[in-house]
Image (tube, rainbow, N blue to C red):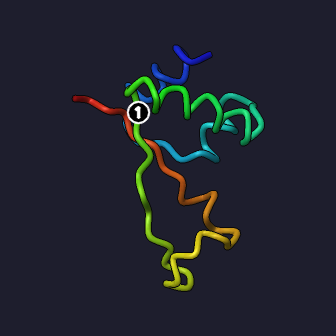
Amino acid sequence: MLTKILNLFKERKIINLSDLSIHFKTDRSAMQGMLQQLIRKGYIELLNAECSTCSANCKSCSFVEEKEYYRLNED
């Protein structure tokens, strides 16, 4: 599964958590676990998106999950 996720990143470069979960028909929490493995191995990185909804940057609103974008680390 991790190889399939990496292949999708090679095609799209930047993908959000919702799209990944839908594409692979996987629960968000399970997908986050797989993404954390790829982050630890240095394959991808989490992009810090500022919340434009309330500007408080509290990360507690419902829009946070939609803002979790990951990028292929091409270093």
> Picture quarter containing residue 4?
top right
Q: Which quarter shows the C terminus?
A: top left
The x and y percentages for residue 23 are 65, 33
The x and y percentages for residue 64 are 61, 64
- Residue pictured at 75% horizontal, 32% vertical: 26
- Under circle 1, the secondary element is strand
Q: Nearer the viewer, residue 20 or 64?
A: 64
Q: Which of 30 and 8 is in front in this view?
A: 30
Q: In this view, does 75 lie above or below 7?
A: below
> Picture quarter containing residue 72?
top left
Along the horizontal axis of the image, is 73 left or right of 69? left
The residue tagged 1 is: 44
Q: What is the residue that sits farthest to the left in this orientation?
A: 75
Along the horizontal axis of the image, is 3 left or right of 64? left
Q: Is residue 18 above or below residue 62?
A: above
- Residue pictured at 58% horizontal, 75% vertical: 58
The x and y percentages for residue 27 are 77, 37
The 10 Å Cα crowd at callout 1, few under 14, some 14 to 19, many 20 or more, is many
